[in-house]
Amino acid sequence: SQQGEEDPQALSIQEGENATMNCSYKTSINNLQWYRQNSGRGLVHLILIRSNEREKHSGRLRVTLDTSKKSSSLLITASRAADTASYFCATDQRGSNDYKLSFGAGTTVTVRA
Amino acid sequence: EAGVAQSPRYKIIEKRQSVAFWCNPISGHATLYWYQQILGQGPKLLIQFQNNGVVDDSQLPKDRFSAERLKGVDSTLKIQPAKLEDSAVYLCASSFIPGFQYFGPGTRLTVL
């Protein structure tokens, strides 16, 4: 079963606007990762946040993690047309030593020019 | 560095036929994963290898799916016989650092 659930399912924004998507999960985790998938392509790793971290930045990306609420958010600032893609959160469950990732169903982001 | 390679990129078969997918991980990556991604869903892990041994195949439908990783490098995933519901993108990933996976471009399978 998929542990993470993204919200919203789809998001349409104007170029230059910010895009925010959320991920909720059920069990305790070691870390949480965000991936991007362009249409017809494989997944590209964006950012990893560990369970003892609360916020992380990478370029125009900002990720937060609230382990008490079992939720994470991904913010893309100053969006570009090239950011059009599906975004997935993936969790690595605490206590597992085989580093399996459980993916959510993803948020589809469309950036309009 | 070269990424994870997969072939073929696309495959169309009729139900009850057989199909095989190939994956070449990044050199030196001991862990290899096969995922199934149905349209509109996130990837679902089918099988995980550590070198040439299976770590987890609990989600692999073993009556029709099989996978092997000879010599701990390349891997093949086979479906025999295929069903309509097997239509999906099959993703291969590899990792060196635990939990940090690099994905290939995937093979899009259409079963008619």
Image: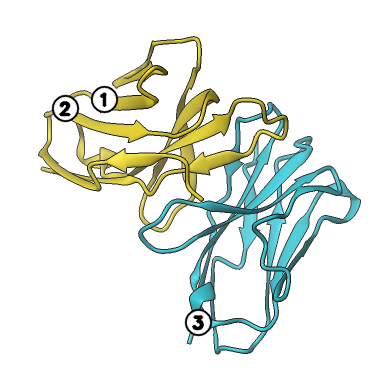
Chain colours: A yellow, B cyan
Question: Is A66 situated above or below A12?
Answer: above
B96 sits left or right of A30 in the view: right
Tag 3 residue: B84
Which residue shows up at 72% across the image and 29% down it? A97
Q: Nearer the viewer, mark 2 or mark 3?
A: 3
Q: Amino acid at mark 2?
A: Asn
Q: Nearer the viewer, residue B32 or A52?
A: A52
Q: Position of residue A61 (x, y in %)?
A: 32, 22
Q: Is residue B82 above or below residue A64?
A: below
Answer whether labels 2 and 1 touch (C-beta < 8 Å): yes
Judge whether A29 appears above or below B55 on screen.
above
Above or below for B44 versus A111: below
Q: CA distance from mark 2 to mark 1?
A: 7 Å
Residue drawn at (55%, 65%) of the image: B9
Please state if A18 lies on the left or on the right of B12 as rendered. Answer: left
Q: Given the image, what chain letter belongs to the residue carrying mark 1?
A: A
Residue designated by label 1? A75
Residue shown at the point (79%, 38%) measured from the top left: B30
Identified by mark 1, the residue type is: Leu
Foreground label between 1 and 3? 3
The chain containing the residue under callout 3 comes to: B
Horizontal placement of B6 versus B41: left or right? right
Q: Which residue is mark 2?
A: A18
Which residue: 45% across, 63% down? B38
- Amino acid type at circle 3 is Leu
